[in-house]
Image (cartoon, rainbow, N blue to C red):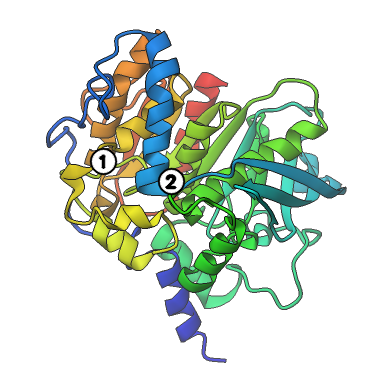
Amino acid sequence: MNRLPFILLLVAALGLTSCAKITLAWADLKPDGPQAAPPVLGDFQGQGSIETLEAWKSERAPIVKEALQENIYGYFPDAYKLTVLSREVLDGEAYNGAGKLEEYKLQASLTFGDEVNETQAFYMNVVSPVGRNNAPVILIQTFCPRWDTIPHPAVYRPEDADGCSGGAATGIMKYVFGRYIATPPVEMILARGYAVATIFPSEFAPDSSERGLAVLKEMSAGMPAQKQRWGAIAAWAWGYSLMIDALAQDNDAERDYITWGHSRYGKSALLAAAFDERVSGVIAHQSGTGGASLNRQKKGESVEAITESYPHWFAPAYKQFAGREEEMSVDQHHLLALIAPRPVLLGNARRDVWSDPNGAFRAALGADPVYELYGSQGLQQKRLSKWSPAADLAFWIRPGTHGVVKEDWPAFLEFLDAHF
């Protein structure tokens, strides 16, 4: 079998031609460009400036959420319900006895307008440190299926299903995108006291411009015509909420849930936290356009480029701002502000200018006033380098390009240890 076409398709699917484009330019190590606009506490959609935390919560945050749905992501369901179809312990001594591996089979119904729709059944795999049932959970979505994220033979894998593991394709993928692009260092994570839960969101919302759009339209049937159909980023963000629902059903004790995502799933990890207060913190690595990076005065991937390459990711309205970003009433600093005062780590790489680390840093600066309203110190750095893992708005940048490499997870865990 000639694997070259598959390898090329794999690299394209992971975003090498768009959201993961490698460039030889170095990201600036000091903020370069105008401040995020409009100011997060300033005039907004006819509402005057606000000064208090109560005004942010009761007056500003609701219209920011509406604006993000209307202009970028599309609308979340009016209501939904998750059903746990089954739950099974696959291995009580996984990872050399360090973890308990479980598998959930899930299905959700969701309401738009007067119609109730159902997702396909999908699976979630959970690895918990032995003896710590209420350990903080890192909720992970990746490019690769669950059986690559948690490479254990007992994990359910549909017959003849593809994956990212094995052969030349895996070697090329890891060479381009780093050793942890498909599989996180689970043993390292367990040793630090954290659990891992993962779904492959394409099981219910395919990452495909044709099939993905068709399924998203089916899922949102019944939505009033005046509202924007949700995109895959919003559907995947909703997937994080479904993971929390499933984990919370069998556990009365409080625990922390941290959404983790790289690139496109970094976008959904941020969006999930903005719309679900149960999310305790976020690690959004190289989330780029439609994630942490500002739309206005940006470098790298443009609104036009991302909506042309991935028309299923966003609401149709987002594409209309291509070349007209200055006309947008809302920007990504508003998204970050909705997460305040919960801790957020924005991961970046110096040569990943396509994901615009500078724009992400300026977005963090723009969101910082809301963190201050909460009494949080928020962003603690004035430059993109010299990060502070204990900051509630932490900005991490390393050498290199787009991917998840050996330096990243130690930094992620340092951030988690500082907060959880």
Q: Assess disc 2: are there few (<14), some (14-19) or many (≥20) residues with their C-alpha within 10 Å of its C-alpha.
A: many
Instruction: Give me the C-alpha separation between circle 1 and circle 2.
Output: 12 Å
Q: Position of residue 92 (x, y in %)?
A: 86, 43
Q: How many marks?
A: 2
Residue 371 appears at what percent x and percent y?
37, 17
Q: Residue at x 68, y 43 (%)?
A: 80
User: Between residues 355 and 71, which one lies in front from this camera angle?
Assistant: 71
Q: Quadrant of the C terminus?
A: top right
First of labels 1, 2 by sequence position:
2
Which label number is shown at residue 57? Answer: none
Residue named by callout 1: 294
Residue at the limit of the structure toward the left, as seen here: 33
Q: Examine the rendering and report whether any part of residue 159 can be seen.
A: yes
User: Is residue 22 something one can see in this rendering?
Assistant: no
Decide: marks 1, 2 in contact (CB < 8 A)? no
Percent position (x, y) of residue 364?
A: 30, 29
Q: Quadrant of the N terminus?
A: bottom right
- Left or right, residue 118 beside residue 226: right
Residue at 52%, 91% (x, y): give it.
Answer: 2
* Among the 4 quarters of the image, the one containing residue 132: top right
Residue tagged by mark 2?
A: 267
Question: In the image as oriented, which residue stretches furthest toward the bottom?
Answer: 1
Left or right: where does residue 219 sit relative to residue 267? right
Relative to 242, does residue 315 appear above or below in the rendering? Answer: below
At 39% from the left and 18% from the top, the residue drawn is 59
Secondary-structure class at tag 1: loop
Helix, strand or loop at label 2? It is helix
The kind of residue tagged 1 is Leu
The crowd level at tag 1 (other Cα within 10 Å; few <14, some 14-19, many 20+) is many
Find residue 327 and report its horizontal and vertical position in percent: 18, 43
Residue 127, placed above or below residue 307: above
Q: Could you tell me the amino acid type at mark 2?
A: Lys
